[in-house]
Amino acid sequence: LSNRNIIINGAMTVSQRGTSFTDNGDVNANAYTLDRFKSERDTDGAATITQSGTSPDGFTSSLKYDITTADTSLAASQYAQITYKVEARDLRHLAYGTSAAKTITLSFYVRSNKTGNYNFVYEQEDNGNKLSSHQYTINSADTWERKVITTAGDTSGVINDDTGAGFNMKWGLAYGDTYSSGVNTNQWAAQSNANFGAGQDVNLLDSTSNEWYITGVQLEVGSQATAFEHRSFGEELALCRRYYRVFQDGSGGGCYMGAVSYNYDVNSVVTQVNFSPEMRATPTLD
């Protein structure tokens, strides 16, 4: 039963970039926070995303989305969401685009003071952003609840065998009418803005008292949600380093980058840095 969970860092234990992130729209409106999880937002409000110690039994960490500036009246095209991109090569075994396309089940733990209906959506980036949109409900305030969403395989789906995004997975926090005026498809269907965030009647940004937590994210083959697959911290960190790697965190001190170096000229030194594991794509330097 090992290697069931397709999601990396679903228990929110790895956060190489730091433990607190300000999402104010001007600076970090579309930025990665805890490893593999990205905040995407276009609203007049603001939030702080943190690696929180508030968690359900059996977990130590969660992603917390805390509203710091309210937006009580969303414009039609405004939105806020948490996104996870699954590398296409990690989805080859789903057999999308064939008669053997496999059913998938997503499970996660969620908590908020703001009860009501929320949206979750998959997108196939390689297939015109074909989507499958779903609704889940937070029933009790400030209580951890486990949610399960099962989606039939897409026999006409397209997931390329490459290092691009096979799935975009998005948890809605707030959607204007452009994205919430349609219906939940509950299966794969053509891309539609109106259906993208359908069923979301919660605007998490309507009060600075609001907060939303998530952890225990698991995506697996089959129609049943199994117990969350915990990996060691070392395994999880190695998987995260395929996408992001910290050599020096800016706190000062030295940083050993390569084992062998040589003088290129009077002002420069050339050194070789080996990435282990190999990164998904040619990295950019921050």
Image (cartoon, rainbow, N blue to C red):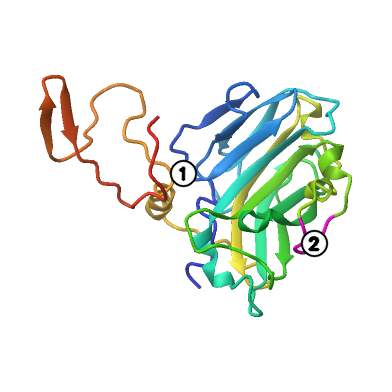
Instruction: Please say if 219 is above or below 192.
Output: below
Helix, strand or loop status at disc 1: loop
**Structural crowding at the residue carrying mark 1, measured as other residues with C-alpha within 10 Å and reported as few (<14), some (14–19) or many (≥20):** many
Find the distance from the CA under tag 2 to the CA under tag 1.
Answer: 31 Å
Q: Quadrant of residue 32?
A: top right
Helix, strand or loop status at disc 2: loop
Nearer to me, 44 or 218: 44
Quadrant location of the C terminus in the rendered image:
top left
Dot placed on the residue nearer the N-terminal end, 2 or 1:
1
Residue 14, label in figure: 1
Left or right side of 4 for 106: right
Whether residue 188 is in magenta: the answer is yes
Horizontal and vertical percent for residue 63?
60, 40
Q: Mark 2 highlights which residue?
A: 186
Residue 112, label in figure: none
Horizontal and vertical percent for residue 67?
71, 27
Q: Residue at x 51, y 50 (%)?
A: 9
Q: Is residue 116 visible?
A: no
Q: Residue at x 46, y 44 (%)?
A: 14
Instruction: Please say if 167 is above or below 75.
Output: below
Left or right side of 227 for 282: left
Q: Quadrant of residue 95?
A: bottom right
Name the kind of residue labelled 2 in the image: Asn
Nearer to me, 25 or 230: 25
Left or right side of 170 for 283: left
Q: Residue at x 23, y 35 (%)?
A: 257
Image: magenta residue range: 184-190
Q: Residue at x 58, y 43 (%)?
A: 62
Name the kind of residue labelled 1 in the image: Val
Left or right side of 134 for 23: left
